[in-house]
Image: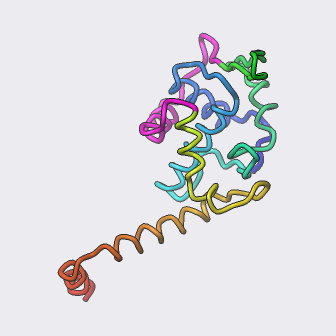
Amino acid sequence: MSLTTPSGTTSQLICAVLAWQGGEIQSESWLLKLLYLTDWENALRTGETLSGWDWVHGPYGPDCEGFLEILHDLEWVQAKQRVWEAGEYTHIRLLEGWPNGDSECMARVQGLLSRAPKTFAALKSHVDQTLPLLKTKIGEPLRLEEWVEKAHEAEVREFLDNLGEGDRKAMEYLAR
């Protein structure tokens, strides 16, 4: 599903990530990376993305077609263009009184992002090291659910490669 309408899920997810960040964020790129990381972490745990969005490997990391249009249409989010010496960015913040009624979404986002880096540079580096971005080229779809299987297979192979002889015999015994 590409991002075409501000559905309840889209709105809740964006607001929950903004709330986790303290209600404000300095760029749409930062927000997009946090949303991608939320989806990737959820896919690693459950096999499915939280958003259902069609992620693409963009020139600056994960991207989702229509994201900026949706962001600017959300009732409880204010996005303002700002200009500084190095260029433009969009300052994004939650407006007072936003309906944070979905506590399950908030709790899930907080859990998924609990180990997320707090600075943009560290977040960018962390996101760029996720398997889907490492293994695809710019313009290709990321298909997070497919990469989850490959990530789990790699973890199992690494675990088995690091087993000692005694561990291997114990596993063979238990498998009988």
Quadrant location, the C terminus? bottom left
Q: Which residues are magenta?
A: 93-120
Q: Is residue 100 left or right of residue 143?
A: left
Residue 147 located within the stretch drawn in magenta: no
Name the colour scheme: rainbow
Q: Nearer the viewer, residue 56 or 129?
A: 129
Vertical order, 98 against 103 (above or below): above
Residue 30 image position (x, y, % from top left) = 63, 32
Question: Hey, which quadrant is residue 27 in on the image?
Answer: top right
Vertical order, 136 against 95 (above or below): below
The number of numbered discs placed on residues in the rendered structure image is 0
Please identify the residue farthest to the top as the structure is shown.
96
Q: Is residue 123 left or right of residue 89?
A: left
- Identity of the residue drawn at 68% across and 19% down: 76
Question: Hey, which quadrant is residue 114 in on the image?
Answer: top left
Q: Nearer the viewer, residue 33 or 173?
A: 33
- Identity of the residue drawn at 72% across and 36% down: 7
Residue 112 image position (x, y, % from top left) = 47, 42
Please identify the residue farthest to the bottom as the structure is shown.
176
- Identity of the residue drawn at 42% across and 39% down: 115
Residue 17 image position (x, y, % from top left) = 56, 31
Residue 122 image position (x, y, % from top left) = 52, 37
Q: Nearer the viewer, residue 171 or 73?
A: 171
Q: Is residue 44 left or right of residue 56?
A: left
Question: Hey, which quadrant is residue 63 in on the image?
Answer: top right
